[in-house]
Image (spheres, rainbow, N blue to C red):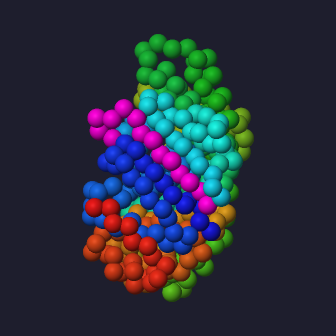
C-alpha cells in the first residue's frame, strides 16, 4: 500500500524547492552526504507524525528564509500541508490546526544509523527510543511525557532558588506522581510485550541459540501515586542540596541482557546490531502497516542483516537513503522494486 504518493518541499533545510513521487514498494533516495537525503525523510516523518525527529521547527527553515512549507499527497488523493513562519500550522481538508490531527497521523518505523548503537547508548537516549515507540501506539502518551517533563523543570527551578516554600514544591510533586506512574506503567507494558518476542525474533536474524531480553530499571515506586509522593518526600532534603529531582521516571534505564549478562561489553558488535534490528521488527509488528524510513543503515550492516531488513519490510512502503557507494547493493537487494532518485 502506498501511503505517501508525493511530497513537495519549499525552504526546508537545504531544499529551496523539491518535489518527488514515491513508489508503492521501495523508493531509494540516492545522493552523496550533505545533499539533503535525510531531510526528505524528516519531511515525510513530519507529515505522518506531526513533528520532526531531528530538531525544532525554527531550525528546519532554510538559511535566509522566513518560512518552510511541506505538501504531502496520499494515495487516496488527500493533501496535507504544513507551514512554519514562527508558528506551525497544518491544513487538512480546508481546516487549519496548530497540530496534526490524531486521525491524520500514520505509524512510522524510523531507522537511523545511531539506532544501531542503542544497546550502549545513554539512559536518556533509550528512554526516548521506547517512549516514542509507546507514543505511536497509545494516544495521549506523548502529552503525558510532556506534562511530566514540564512539571520536572518547574520543580527543579524552585529547588535552585535560595528561598522557596515546601508547599510550592509539593504542587509539582503531585503532578510528577500522577504522570510518573502512568509513564512507568506503559514502559513496563511495552517491555513485557517486546520480551515475549525478542529472543525468537533475534534468533531469526542472528541464526543462533542466544537468549536476549530487556530489563527495565525503574527508580520509581512499584505501586501508586501515594508511594511515588512518599519517595519524593524522602528525597526532598537531598533534592534541596543538589538543586534537582533525584527520584523519578526521568532516571529510568533499559538494559539489554545477552545470555544472562549485560549486552554492553559482553555482546559483539554484530550481536548488538541484531538486537536493535529485532527491536525494529517487533515495533513494526506492533503497528498497523507502518511506513518504513531507513536512513543510510545499509552501509552499517553486513549482507545477512541487510537481507533480513529487506525480507521483513517487503510488504511495507519503504523509503531509504543511500550514497553512490551503496547504490548497487540496494539495487541487488531489491531488484526491480527499487526506484532511484538522484538528488545531487
Residue 288 in view here: yes
Question: Which residue is at 60% across, 75% downward?
Answer: 315
Q: Is residue 309 above or below residue 287?
A: below
Q: Is residue 343 magenta?
A: no
Q: Up-down: is 343 above or below 58?
A: below
- Asked if the stretch drawn in magenta spans residue 74, the answer is yes
Q: Quadrant of residue 137?
A: bottom right
Residue at 28%, 61% (x, y): give it: 344
Question: Residue 63: percent from the left, percent from the top?
Answer: 29, 38
User: Which one is in front, 20 or 310?
Assistant: 20
Side (left or right) of 139 relative to 114: right
Is residue 339 shown above or below 204?
Answer: above
Residue 234 in view here: no
Tell me residue 231's x, y (percent). 61, 36
Residue appearing at x 63%, y 55% in the figure: 77
Looking at the image, which residue is at 43% across and 78% down? Answer: 306
Percent position of residue 15, x then y: 34, 49
User: Residues in magenta?
Assistant: 62-75
Is 46 drawn above or below residue 64 in the view shown? Answer: below
Report the front residue among 269 and 300: 300
Residue 287, position in %: x, y?
65, 62
Residue 284 lies in what quarter of the image? Answer: bottom right
- The answer to which quarter of the image holds residue 341 is bottom left
Amino acid at each position: 500500500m502506498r501511503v505517501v504518493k508525493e511530497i513537495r518541499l519549499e525552504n526546508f533545510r537545504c531544499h529551496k524547492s523539491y518535489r518527488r513521487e514515491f513508489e508503492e514498494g521501495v523508493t531509494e533516495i540516492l545522493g552523496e552526504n550533505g545533499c539533503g537525503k535525510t531531510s526528505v525523510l524528516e519531511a515525510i516523518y513530519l507529515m505522518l507524525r506531526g513533528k520532526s525527529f531531528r530538531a525544532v521547527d525554527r531550525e528546519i527553515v532554510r538559511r535566509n528564509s522566513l518560512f518552510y512549507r511541506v505538501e504531502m499527497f496520499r494515495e487516496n488523493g488527500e493533501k496535507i500541508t504544513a507551514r512554519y513562519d514562527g508558528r506551525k500550522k497544518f491544513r487538512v481538508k480546508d481546516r487549519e490546526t496548530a497540530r496534526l490531527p490524531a486521525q491524520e497521523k500514520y505509524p512510522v518505523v524510523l531507522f537511523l544509523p545511531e539506532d544501531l548503537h542503542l544497546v550502549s547508548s545513554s539512559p536518556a537516549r533509550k528512554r526516548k527510543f521506547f517512549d516514542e515507540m509507546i507514543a505511536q501506539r497509545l494516544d495521549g502518551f506523548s502529552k503525558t511525557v510532556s506534562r511530566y517533563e514540564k512539571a520536572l523543570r518547574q520543580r527543579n527551578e524552585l529547588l535552585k532558588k535560595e528561598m522557596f516554600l515546601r508547599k510550592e514544591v509539593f504542587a509539582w510533586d503531585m503532578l510528577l506522581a500522577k504522570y510518573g506512574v502512568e509513564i512507568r506503567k506503559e514502559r513496563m507494558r511495552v517491555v513485557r510485550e517486546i520480551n515475549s518476542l525478542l529472543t525468537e525474533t533475534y534468533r531469526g536474524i542472528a541464526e543462533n541459540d542466544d537468549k536476549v531480553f530487556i530489563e527495565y530499571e525503574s527508580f520509581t515506586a512499584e505501586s501508586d501515586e501515594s508511594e511515588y509522593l512518599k519517595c519524593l518526600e524522602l528525597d526532598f532534603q537531598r533534592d534541596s542540596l543538589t538543586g534537582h529531582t533525584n527520584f523519578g521516571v526521568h532516571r529510568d534505564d533499559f538494559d539489554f541482557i545477552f545470555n544472562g549478562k549485560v549486552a554492553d561489553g559482553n555482546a559483539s558488535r554484530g550481536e548488538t546490531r541484531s538486537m536493535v534490528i529485532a527491536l525494529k521488527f517487533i515495533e513494526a509488528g506492533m503497528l498497523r502497516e507502518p511506513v518504513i524510513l531507513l536512513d543510510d543503515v545499509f552501509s552499517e550492516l553486513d549482507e545477512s542483516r541487510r537481507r533480513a531488513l529487506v525480507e521483513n519490510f517487503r510488504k511495507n512502503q519503504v523509503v531509504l537513503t543511500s550514497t553512490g557507494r551503496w547504490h548497487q547493493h540496494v539495487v541487488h537487494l531489491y531488484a526491480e522494486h527499487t526506484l532511484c532518485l538522484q538528488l545531487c
